[in-house]
Image: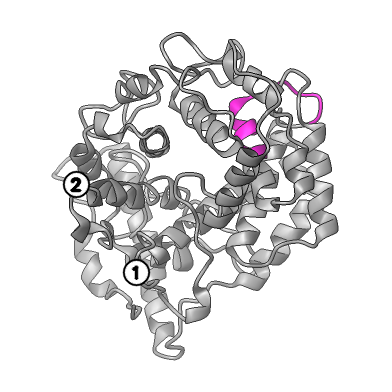
Amino acid sequence: MENRIRCYEDIASEAFDLENYVSDTSSDQLDVEAMILKIYKQFEKSTDIEPEFPVVRKRVHVQLLKDYLRKLPTNYECLDASRTWIVYWILHSLWLLNDMPDAETLSDAVYFLNLCQHEEGGYGGGPGQYPHLGTTYAAVNALSIIGTEEAYNSLDRSSLQKFLWTVRDVDGSFALHKGGEQDIRGAYCAVSIAKITNTYTDALFDKTAEWIVGCQTYEGGFGGCPGMEAHGGYAFCGIASLALLNKTQLCDIDALLRWCVNRQMRLEGGFQGRTNKLVDGCYSFWQGAAFPIISAILSQDNKELIETVLFDQGALQEYIIICCQALPSGGFIDKPGKHRDIYHTCYALSGLSVAQHGTGAGDPFVVGRPKNELNRIHPLYNVAPHLAYNAVHYFIRHPPPVKDKN
């Protein structure tokens, strides 16, 4: 599909309407819009000189990610309990950029992740730390990306399944760790882990879909638990979980679609996480990945919708490439004025892939030069489709050695 750039003089008319009432929220929104519109207008001038703009500076991003995989800077010390996440974020970003580390480095990553595996099942955020569904999800995804027998065989699925039972409640919800909070992130991480490792059973996820549907709000999105405000990350977790459980018919898909399309910002082009919040690069994935899932659900009843992309792909790509690249040193940011970090790098790149590949049914739509195209992701797992497939089928051929029991 031919690329195209919006006319930034025209989108200035899409600025936030104060409606004669000034609040902290509206003032922040106007400040962000003014900053982003200035960036877009400066960029528009550069396109007269270089028609292939905008450019994804893949080389600098790859170099930063590979450096961080070997040694993190000291300001990441506060994320000591998220080191399995960091391994996943980096490996997934490198896969998207089509520049994976060498076999020795990947084997070292497997060794490190094995140190994070708890004797009672699951993974902590670092060696010796208690298991947590979030860090277990990250470790399983990282091992799936590595995709070697060494990676697959390092995973103790018998103890993993026991761990999943220990964080499950009788109502079908999942706590993120023993004694921890129960929210929709736990449900998503649990079902994603169970599906990709072939530790899923109907008994383990009895009532889970019904609990998730109880998190859908009057707005149409999903909150963290019943009664909470709809949020982009929770909405993704909700609809992805229901798709993995094959229970999407239980939710109000039309209301979810209406809520999601209203989260794309008219001027910025990126997504906000909640109503009346600011644009954020990470929601390029959390909101953006919901759309191919919704398209797949709707196309079950109407095959003509299978190639229909339900958000503005070009506008999202422009926001990510023009406003969120941390240049010249590499990485991606939340929004202009923020610092780069590996989390936003991963999810901005994931969202860029979603924006380029849409539903995956048609030709890619790449803004800027053709080399901007990233590898595709599986929207339910946020790893490459064939890597998810390979992991699932490996674990099907090698079932866990113990029977499922509570």
Residue 45, how many percent across, how many down? 39, 83
Location of the N terminus (image quadrant): bottom left
Apparent side of residue 37 relative to residue 399 in the rendered image (left or right): left
Q: Is residue 128 magenta?
A: yes
Q: Residue beneath label 1, please?
A: 362
Residue 383 in view of the camera: yes
Magenta residues span 127-140
Residue found at x 74% / y 29%:
156
Q: Quadrant of residue 34?
A: bottom left
Rendered view: 93 above or below 137: below
Residue 212, how many percent across, how many down? 36, 24
Residue density around tag 2, few if under 14, some if 14–19, many if 20 or more, within 10 Å? few
Separation of residues labelled 2 and 1 (CA atoms): 40 Å
Residue 262 in view of the camera: no
The residue type indicated by label 1 comes to Gly
Residue found at x 53% / y 65%:
375
User: Is label 2 in a helix, a strand or a loop?
Assistant: loop
Pointer 2 with pointer 1, Cβ within 8 A: no
Residue found at x 49% / y 11%:
169
The residue type indicated by label 2 comes to Leu
Q: Residue beneath label 2, please?
A: 18
Q: Is residue 177 magenta?
A: no
Residue 162, how many percent across, how many down? 65, 17
Give the mark nearer the N terminus: 2 vs 1: 2
* Residue sticking out furthest to the bottom: 49
Apparent side of residue 181 relative to residue 70 in the rendered image (left or right): left
Location of the C terminus (image quadrant): top right
Residue 11, how many percent across, how many down? 24, 67
Q: Quadrant of residue 133?
A: top right
User: Is label 1 in a helix, a strand or a loop?
Assistant: loop
Q: Quadrant of residue 405?
A: top right
